[in-house]
Amino acid sequence: MYKLIALALIVSSVFAVQKDTKTILAEIDADNFGNTILSTVQMYLQSKGNAEEILVLLNQVLAGLVDDQNKHDNVIRVDRAACTRIVTDLENSIAYHTAQVSANAQMREDNEKALAEAETDVRQTIQDIESNERTYAQEEANRNKAHETWVRKNGEHDDAIAAVDEATKLVQHLSLGATFAELKPKFEAVQKRLIENESHGALFQPIVTALTELATKVDQKAIQRILQLLSQLRQQLVEARSVLEDTENRQAQRWVEFSTHLSNEHNRLVDRKNQLEQAIQTFKTNIDTATHFYEVHQLELEQAQETLDAEHEWCDLQENTYSVQSTERTRQQEIVERILEHLTEKLTATSQYLGGRF
């Protein structure tokens, strides 16, 4: 049947058809796949001479190419879905690790800054503690020295007042009729006591002089004058002692207040130092932790990026392979279809071409 169709076509335009068929078949023959198919067709025609069998075979080849393409279409769909899922997961992982790297880098930077400030503060606090302790020691020494001075001066005033009281008693005895000779040893002892009082020597000089005069002349007028001097002197000594005592009490109270302030400040500084030292350890721990996780996430990020690059490369390879193979299968389908067309529509011309191939 196919031979009859071919003969009818040859009768209508034999030369034009032969030229067109030869050109097309020559182009197909120049292709490796086309050459293989034409060789197969030639072998069947030469051995069996049955065009229908070769048509069945070529249709099977064409169906195989279509089926193969369908399979590869399914494979590429699966690959594309896998690529999309894996790439999305990797991109999410990269975004996560990038954020963690940034967060830990910022955490490390913040803690390093805080650590530097805390170390500066703790050094200053230690200096403040040392200054506080020096101030306390110095002020305590000054207070002790001032107190010792007051104790000494207060004792001198007590001695002076006691000497004045003793002198007053002796002079009063004279005013009551006692003779100087009877009281002479006591007078000499009082005079010596007054003279040896270094802190009030100048103050006692008039009294010493007056008592010396009594040794040569005793009269009521002189006695009253001496008693008046002794009374005035005693009043001055009592007032001076009172002033010193008031001063001592004020200074003692100020020291209580100031020492309490220094102690409170010392406690505050020690607490601050302890807090800063604890904070420093916390900052160092945070820095170590941030550095560790920075390195962990940086490594994970690099690995995820490498995996993503490899995945992109693999996906691109699958796409390229699919594209190349699909193009090749399309080309092969076109070749088979063109050969089928010539076998069904131009069998004689095709047979003539194949007969002259070798």
Image (cartoon, grey):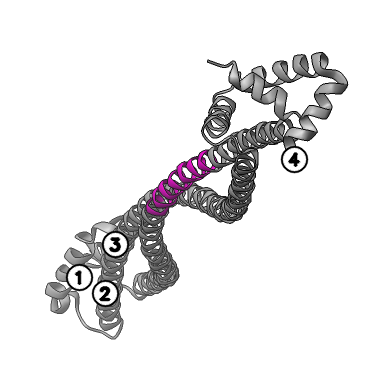
- Marks counted in the figure total 4
Cα distance, mark 4 to mark 2? 174 Å
* The magenta segment: 291-314
Q: Earlier in the sequence, mark 1 or mark 2?
A: 2
Cα distance, mark 3 to mark 2? 27 Å
Residue hosting label 1: 190
Q: Main secondary structure of the magenta part?
A: helix
- Numbered disc 4: secondary structure: loop
Q: Residue at x 38, y 68 (%)?
A: 267
The amino acid type of the residue labelled 1 equals: Val
- Numbered disc 1: secondary structure: helix
Question: Which disc, if any, is residue 63?
Answer: none
| Marks 3 and 4 close (CB-CB < 8 Å) | no
Q: Earlier in the sequence, mark 4 or mark 2?
A: 4
State which mark lies toward you, 4 or 2. Answer: 4
Residue hosting label 4: 1
Cα distance, mark 3 to mark 4? 148 Å
Q: Position of residue 13 (x, y in %)?
A: 85, 19
**Is 206 placed left or right of 8 in the picture?**
left
Cα distance, mark 1 to mark 4? 173 Å
Q: Earlier in the sequence, mark 1 or mark 4?
A: 4
Query: Quick check: can you spot residue 200?
Result: no
Q: Residue at x 71, y 22 (%)?
A: 349
Q: Residues within 10 Å of mark 1 (few under 14, many from 20)?
A: many
Q: Position of residue 72 (x, y in %)?
A: 58, 48
Front-most of residues 247 and 183? 247
The amino acid type of the residue labelled 3 equals: Thr
Residue hosting label 3: 149
Residue hosting label 2: 167
The amino acid type of the residue labelled 4 equals: Met
